[in-house]
Structure formats: C-alpha cells, structure tokens
Image (cartoon, rainbow, N blue to C red):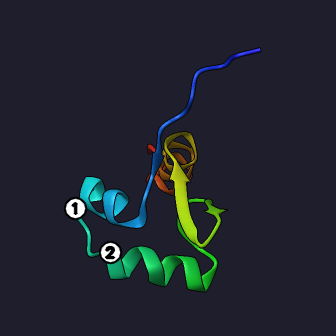
Amino acid sequence: MDMRLECYLSPQKLAELMDIPVATIYRWRSAGGGPRGHRVGKHVRYRMSDVHLWLDACADKAP
C-alpha cells in the first residue's frame, strides 16, 4: 500500500498554477467541467493527478 500523501490544490492554487482566473475554476465546477474536485468539509480540493488526467484528456490530438 502506497502511503504517500498526494498533493491537493485549493481552487486558488490551481488557478495560480494554470495562470487563469479563479472564477474560471469555479465556473468549470458549477458547469460540471474541469478537473475532478473533492469536497473536504466545506472546501473543494483538486488532486494533482486528477488535474494531469484532465489536461491529458483536453490535449489537442496529434495529426
């Protein structure tokens, strides 16, 4: 069993890393898009691995 703690990002940190407005992160979440979020109490967090999976799925297909 892998006991390493994965990196979780707040919406603000995710927006900062992606260089986009935090409002975009919230808009994606309310529309059912964007990377998979996890509710921790009243907070939403994003696993870095889910962000990478989502980005890979959004990537342009190579010709």
- What count of labels does the image hold? 2
Q: Nearer the viewer, residue 39 or 53?
A: 39
Q: How far from the left and from the top, in percent, is residue 37? A: 60, 62
Residue at point 56%, 77% (across, down): 29
Residue 25 figure quarter: bottom left
Residue at far top of view? 1
Residue 51, numbered label:
none
Tell me the kind of residue under disc 1.
Asp
Q: Is residue 7 above or below residue 47?
A: above
Q: How far from the left and from the top, in percent, is residue 52? A: 49, 43
Q: Is residue 14 above or below residue 7?
A: below
Q: How far from the left and from the top, in percent, is residue 4? A: 58, 21
Return the residue at label 1: 19
Q: Is residue 63 above or below residue 25?
A: above
Tell me the kind of residue under disc 2.
Val
Q: Is residue 53 above or below residue 16?
A: above
Left or right of 38 on screen, residue 12 = left
Quarter of the figure with the C terminus: top left
Q: Nearer the viewer, residue 61 or 49?
A: 49
Residue at point 32%, 75% (across, down): 22
Residue 24 figure quarter: bottom left
Return the residue at label 2: 22
Quarter of the figure with the N terminus: top right
Mark 2 element type: helix
